[in-house]
Image: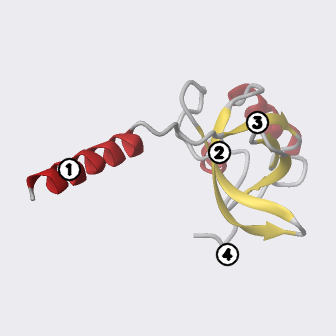
């Protein structure tokens, strides 16, 4: 009776340790700021365009918004994407830079709005 319990306990400990030491998932990386609301990102398998969610850039405000994004998101900045849908086949997501970025942890749409370069559409909460 003791031997099967000991083996079960050993297997359980081994399983838990494998879960705890599993490598972290790779984050997407910014490859290019395409405009004030579009990013080109890659995740080591593919590249795709991401539109920033909950963002309305005023007419003529695209260049300053794109420059703000370029300043805070150098190439290869790791980002977390939280998809909210798609717009004409383009992924729409909330985007947050990860460790080491100037905008660490700030949602990019919220940052552009706080900087006065964009507004939040009425249909977005």
Q: Which of the pair 15/93 is nearer the observer?
A: 15
Residue identifier under label 2: 108
Badge 2 local density, few (<14 within 10 Å), some, or many (20+)? many
Q: CA distance from mark 1 to mark 3?
A: 44 Å
Decide which of 33, 55 is in the foreground and name it.
33
Element carrying mark 3? strand
Q: Residue at x 65, y 45 (%)?
A: 108
The percent position of residue 114, horizontal first and vertical second, equals 60, 45
- Quarter of the image for residue 87 reads bottom right
Q: Earlier in the sequence, mark 2 or mark 1?
A: 1
Where does residue 82 sit, x and y in percent of width and height?
62, 57
Badge number at residue 9: 1
Q: How far is mark 1 from mark 4, CA to CA?
A: 53 Å
Residue drawn at 56 percent across, 24 percent down? 100
Do labels 3 and 2 touch, CB within 8 Å? Answer: no
Mark 1 or 3, which is nearer the eye? 1
Q: Earlier in the sequence, mark 2 or mark 4?
A: 2
Q: How many marks?
A: 4
Sequence-first tag of 3 and 2: 3
Dot 4 and dot 3 residues touching (CB under 8 Å): no
Q: Quadrant of residue 30?
A: top right
Q: Quadrant of the N terminus?
A: bottom left
Residue 107, x across and y down, in percent: 59, 47
Mark 4 lies on residue? 123
Tell which tag, 4 or 3, sits nearer the viewer: 3
**Which one is in front in this view, the residue at disc 1 or the one at disc 4?**
1
Which marked residue is nearer to the observer: mark 2 or mark 1?
Answer: 1
How far is mark 2 from mark 1, CA to CA? Answer: 46 Å
The chosen color scheme is: secondary structure
């Amino acid at each position: 009776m003791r031997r099967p319990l000991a083996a079960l306990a050993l297997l359980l400990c081994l399983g838990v340790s494998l879960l705890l030491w599993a490598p972290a998932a790779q984050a997407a990386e910014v490859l290019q700021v395409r405009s004030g609301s579009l990013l080109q990102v890659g995740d080591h398998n593919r590249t795709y365009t991401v539109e920033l969610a909950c963002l309305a850039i005023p007419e003529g405000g695209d260049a300053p918004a794109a420059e703000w994004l370029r300043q805070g998101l150098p190439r290869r900045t790791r980002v977390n994407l939280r998809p909210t849908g798609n717009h004409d086949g383009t992924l729409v997501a909330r985007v947050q830079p990860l460790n080491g970025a100037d905008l660490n942890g700030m949602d990019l749409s919220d940052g552009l709005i706080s900087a006065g370069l964009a507004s939040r559409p009425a249909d977005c909460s």
